[in-house]
């Protein structure tokens, strides 16, 4: 039952995160729309959520998500994670999250090269 509940709640979390974070980017509205159109369409919600769980929690990487992450690109990935790490509830732990971000990126790049 808890597993079903997490599958139902996960898409709502992704939508809430996107709605909360996109308007606050310190870029012009046209740039934010461009970022949205170019970055977030390259990764599935399932993989985005998996990567967020890894960086900000204790998730386990789904290796098939590495392809999506590398396809999204380092700039998009870095901006999203940095922005999320700057949230008031996470301040003070940014270095920890940025290290996890870099570790996930390096791992995914290495997997993508061998695939």
Image (cartoon, rainbow, N blue to C red):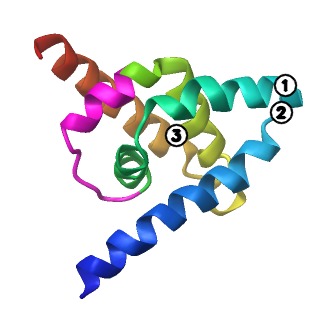
For the point 65% across and 63% down, the residue is 89
For the point 61% across and 30% down, the residue is 79
Tell me the distance, in whole angstroms, between the alpha carbons under discs 2 and 1: 11 Å
What's the magenta region? Answer: 57-70
Farthest residue, direction right = 28
The residue that disc 1 covers is 30
- Residue 111: give x, y in percent of width and height: 17, 22
- Residue 6: give x, y in percent of width and height: 34, 74
The residue that disc 3 covers is 95
For the point 65% across and 41% down, the residue is 83
Kindly identify which numbered label has been placed on residue 58: none
On screen, residue 46 above or below 32: below
Q: Quadrant of the N terminus?
A: bottom left
Q: Secondary structure at mark 2?
A: loop
Tell me the distance, in whole angstroms, between the alpha carbons under discs 3 and 2: 21 Å
The answer to the question of whether label 3 and label 1 lie on touching residues, with beta carbons closer than 8 A, is no
On screen, residue 19 above or below 83: below
Q: Nearer the viewer, mark 3 or mark 1?
A: 1
Instruction: Inspect the magenta stretch and tell me whether residue 111 lies in it.
Output: no
Q: Nearer the viewer, residue 39 or 78?
A: 39
Q: Nearer the viewer, residue 7 or 107?
A: 7
Tell me the distance, in whole angstroms, between the alpha carbons under discs 3 and 1: 30 Å
User: Would residue 115 appear left or right of 60 to someone viewing this image?
Assistant: left
The answer to the question of whether label 2 and label 1 lie on touching residues, with beta carbons closer than 8 A, is no
On screen, residue 3 above or below 104: below
Q: Residues within 10 Å of mark 3 (few under 14, many from 20)?
A: few
Kindly identify which numbered label has been placed on residue 26: 2
Q: Nearer the viewer, mark 2 or mark 1?
A: 1
- Residue 51: give x, y in percent of width and height: 37, 45
Q: Secondary structure at mark 3?
A: helix
For the point 71% across and 56% down, the residue is 20
* Residue 16 in which image quadrant: bottom right
């Amino acid at each position: 039952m808890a597993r079903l509940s997490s599958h139902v709640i996960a898409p709502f979390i992704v939508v809430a995160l996107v709605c909360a974070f996109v308007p606050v980017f310190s870029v012009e509205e046209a740039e934010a729309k461009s970022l949205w159109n170019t970055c977030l369409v390259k990764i599935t919600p399932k993989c985005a959520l998996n990567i967020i769980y890894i960086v900000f929690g204790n998730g386990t990487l789904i290796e098939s998500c590495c392809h999506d992450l590398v396809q999204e690109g380092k700039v998009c990935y870095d901006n999203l994670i940095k922005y999320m790490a700057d949230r008031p509830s996470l301040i003070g732990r940014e270095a920890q999250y940025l290290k996890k971000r870099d570790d996930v990126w390096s791992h995914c790049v290495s997997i993508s090269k061998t695939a």
